Amino acid sequence: MNAPVRRLRADRVTLAHGGGGKAMRELIEDVFVSVFRPDGLEDQARLQAAALAEPGARLAFTTDGFVVDPVEFPGGDIGRIAVCGTVNDLVVGGARPLWLSAAFIIEEGCEVALLRRIAASMQAAAEEAGVAIVTGDTKVVGRGSADRVFVTTSGVGVIPAGRALAADRVRPGDVAIVNGVLGDHGAAILAARGDMALSTDVASDCQPLGALVEAVLAAAPGTRAARDATRGGLASALNEIAEAAGCGIVIDETALPLRTEVKGLCEILGLDPLYLANEGTLVLFAPEHEADAALAAMRSVPAGRDAVAIGRAVGDHPGRVVMQTVFGGRRIVDMLVGEQLPRIC
Amino acid sequence: MKFADEFRDPAAARGVLAAIAGVTAEIGATADAPIRIMEICGGHTHAIFRYGLDKLTPPGLEFIHGPGCPVCVLPMGRVDECVALAERPEVIFTTFGDAMRVPGTRKSLMQAKAEGCDIRMVYSPLDALELARRNPDREIVFFGLGFETTTPSTALSIQQAAAEGLANFSVFCNHITVPPPIRALLDDPRMVLDGFVGPGHVSMVIGTRPYDFIARDYGKPIVVAGFEPLDLLQSVLMVLEQIRDGRAEVENQYARVVPDEGNPVSIAACADVYEPRPSFEWRGLGEIDLSGLRIRERYAGFDAERRFAIGYGAARAAVPEPEGCACGEVMTGRIKPRQCPQFGTGCTPEMPLGALMVSSEGACAAYYQYGGGQLEPAG
């Protein structure tokens, strides 16, 4: 990239910026390429295959679309979430993330300054996660056909030989551990929308979890499975695992880590924090003899400071998640029905 | 969490549970001949399942889930009228989110929205008023739904609209009141109830006096209860103690929130705006005298029924329930949700057949979500 970067002078995106001509080049080069600095501007990224050549290694590939509303919120923005979300989808499968693509659907009239902030935030999150944004695309649609900007990221990573994190490996007796407090992302988005005129200091937990998973796998290599508790919250992640593993899961209500503000928000609005979305929180299952090691490893990294065991897999009620309530009562924790909040990520 | 955790203290709960078991035994109630207590309010139904209270109380005590979920008792014909209003191109139809998934004959509001109707979920009728101010060329209709808890806020929004002279705001009034269906249930010879847990938030508005007839005329105890688990357990204990002692009184467990005389400002606003309908249809219960509210003549301009010529009265034919739907049987306590042949198969929260499966306060949805009856050993 030796040619001088074309500068984009417009304040707002117009349909011309999607037209394939000079204006589009200015948008792409000035707003995105100058920040992501991909290696070349061909229509595809050309990547070294060496990392994939290790015998027994597997390629991991995932994609995710992001439509969060509002686009910027306490603790992050759509760019940060687009990087962290896709990175976390890779790392919970044991992959080391390498490369991302980023595609932007931009609504006519979107402020260029917003796009610049999003690009900077994506690059910062990518550096934090140790991935490179190597290719991308932009499209501009007429006003009303999108809401400011939607982002789609795809990610490629490598699963080293010998790793096999998968929900169907969970066995009765395994311990369920979460890395931090639940529901911050959902609560932050809800408050940021302003519909409820509620003010709170809760910020999204949006963060990449690669370092956390690597630390756990080094200390507890027998770890069975991990899931990031995004849309549908912890309840949905646990239900997916119970179903895949064909065992039951029991969690202890008193052990669930929740901020007082999030609990309060849920009380006022009648929401259940078990279903609130997270963007930097995962649940993993470790065999009992490695559970302490996994917990200690989590607590040794910033993203796992508040890690805590919340329950375990059991042989009873296969496919079902049951919570021991604060009272010693028991109730089923089902999958989320309908939607608790639209456009959460 | 302050003001909540105190009412969820497990040690205190164990004490109350032990007392409940003791009094139930003193009465001589057993699983075969249980004491049946109806919690009138859907919020209580939800709390019972959320905290697993039904698993902690003795087998000689049975909870019957009452008609106090406004979404659940909304007749299907009224949902159809909501959809028809929303389908008018000039209308922005505003509603609480709970009502979106209630099935109508043709479709739910959720389906109508997906098909292009302008339907907005609001958190308060004041949000609908704001929409009316900002969209003077559109007709803003607010779906007034609920018991005495939501009735005052709708009344205040109508008074406010009148004061501002807003010409494009109206309310499709489906507000209902708690005492008449209780009377109807008590008059039903098939109903065997021993006492009631009364609704806390409704009573915050109307006070406790409107329940006097339950104790005086029907000889049944009623205790107005808060919504935390300890509130509920303590109220159940108070009902049981009345039964044991042969008393029938209106007691107020929720005195920290509920004054006996209610909230005079709310009562006055409601009296100004509404008058009782001669009768109103309740899903599963049928027509109940004086159980619904309509907007008074003096606020006719804000009444969507008058504005859009929607009748309610003799000319109106009740829309039959979908085939196989046993919501009425469940609502009157004659069967448990799991005894309905459609439960969990033809009727789920994702694809509800009957209204009790729609709202999280509906008995069937609570059973389904929290696994009522599924955690017990087989047999």
Image (spheres, coloured by chain):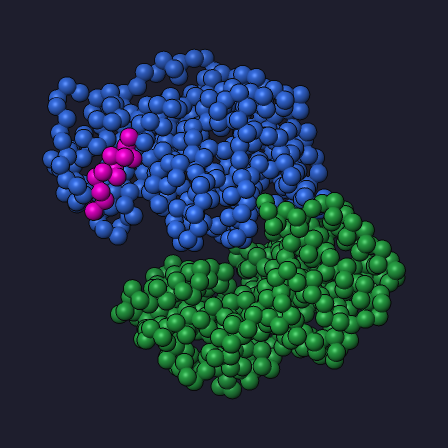
B309 and A111: which one is in front? Answer: A111
B369 and A295: which one is in front? Answer: A295
Q: Is residue A217 above or below residue B348?
A: above
Magenta part of the chain: A109-120
**Residue A299 placement (x, y as % from top left):** 55, 23
B62 and B111: which one is in front? Answer: B62
Which chain: green?
B
**Residue B11 placement (x, y as % from top left):** 74, 44
**Residue A223 placement (x, y as % from top left):** 58, 23
Answer with left or right where residue B9 lies relative to residue A226. Answer: right
Q: Quadrant of the N terminus of chain A?
A: top left
Queried whether the magenta region covers residue B138, the answer comes back as no
Q: Quadrant of the C terminus of chain A?
A: top left
Task: Identify the image quadrant of residue A298.
Answer: top right
- Considering the whole magenta stretch, tell me its main secondary structure: helix
Q: Is residue B6 above or below residue B199?
A: above
Q: Colour of chain A?
A: blue
Q: Which residue shows up at 64% across the image and 29% down it? A: A175
- Residue lying farthest to the bottom in this orientation: B314
**Residue B276 placement (x, y as % from top left):** 54, 81
Q: Which residue shows up at 12% across the image and 23% down it? A: A4
